Amino acid sequence: MSDILVSSADGITTLAFNRPDKKNAITAAMYAALADALEAADKDAAIRAVLITGTPGCFTAGNDLQDFLANPPRGNDSPVARFLRAISTARKPLVAAVTGVAVGVGTTMLLHCDLVYAAKSARLSLPFVNLALVPEAASSLLLPRTIGNRRAAELLLMGEPIEAEKAAAWGLINAAVDDDALAETALKAARKLAAKAPQALALSKQLMKASPEEIAAQMQAEMVHFSAQLQSAEAREAMTAFFEKRPPKFG
Ligand code: COA
């Protein structure tokens, strides 16, 4: 079965991470599948909303670290760059349902979604610096703007997970809901959006967002540092330490 499940019904395209044995860590092939599905949904007039979800108990552990080390993303046509472009410029409303862990891009992608619901047991984290990397997905711009500099520093510099209820109190997500109510809550929101006037919805979304040029420029700047850091000795040590299940040693 595919690592990204794509299905459409009643005007809603659902994208589901489906690689539970690796905590839904996202490979280049998965980024490409996500980009394809988002681009297709955006072009299809019958699709009025997109729902992004994971497997029970796991949204995604973020970038697949092994894949990233083996095939570092290069340039604007890399699958991860295509995905980030597609999610950050999507005209259709995006709803996310987060269970379990949302690590790295699992959390930064939420900054590009319009409505985000998380199970109360979910944990969100941005451990880029812990991996000797830098923020991506324009999170270095959008996170301080969304939750303020102090809180963004806790997430981006300290890299420690926060609980869904704190994320909701900070305004990073719309609501933390009981675990067994999450799927229904998110689907209900997607259905409500799908029933609204599509043009008014797309225009309103566009008006509410930061300028696409600003986001693209920030992503570009982040990618320069991200790619360089990925090749660095400190990142190699951090990622090797993860797979060897030991704390990293930075010189
Ligand atoms: N990339 C590649 N493989 C990953 C991964 C990732 N981001 N996250 C988890 N995995 C793999 C683990 O290596 C393990 O594989 P194995 O069974 O072959 O040993 C499997 O998924 C299960 O992960 P495990 O760490 O045992 O699960 P856990 O429930 O104890 O912890 C996490 C879950 C998500 C907290 C932990 O896996 C983690 O911290 N992952 C890294 C997250 C990360 O740094 N992402 C990148 C951000 S840029």
Image (cartoon, rainbow, N blue to C red):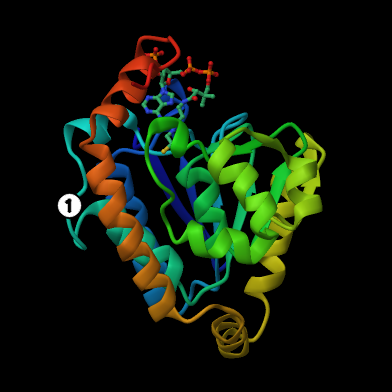
Which picture quadrant has residue 217?
A: bottom left
The residue located at (26%, 38%) in the rendering is 230
Front position in the image: 1 or 171: 171
Q: In which quarter of the image is ligand 1?
A: top left
Compared across the picture, whether 142 is left or right of 69 comes to right
Total marks shown come to 1
Residue found at the far front of this picture? 251
- Label 1, ligand 1: CB separation under 8 Å: no
The residue located at (67%, 72%) in the rendering is 193
Quadrant into which the C terminus falls: top left
Residue for badge 1: 74
**Residue 163 location (% of width, % of height):** 73, 36
Q: Is mark 1 on a helix, strand or loop?
A: loop
**Residue 161 location (% of width, % of height):** 63, 33
Residue 167 visible in the displayed image: yes
The residue located at (74%, 41%) in the rendering is 164
Q: Considering only vertical position in the picture, is 86 above or below 125? A: below
Quadrant into which the N terminus falls: top left
**Residue 28 location (% of width, % of height):** 26, 43
Compared across the picture, whether 93 is left or right of 147 comes to left
| Callout 1 amino acid | Arg
**Residue 24 location (% of width, % of height):** 44, 32
Mark 1 residue crowding within 10 angstroms, few (<14) / some (14–19) / many (20+): few
Compared across the picture, whether 220 is left or right of 150 comes to left
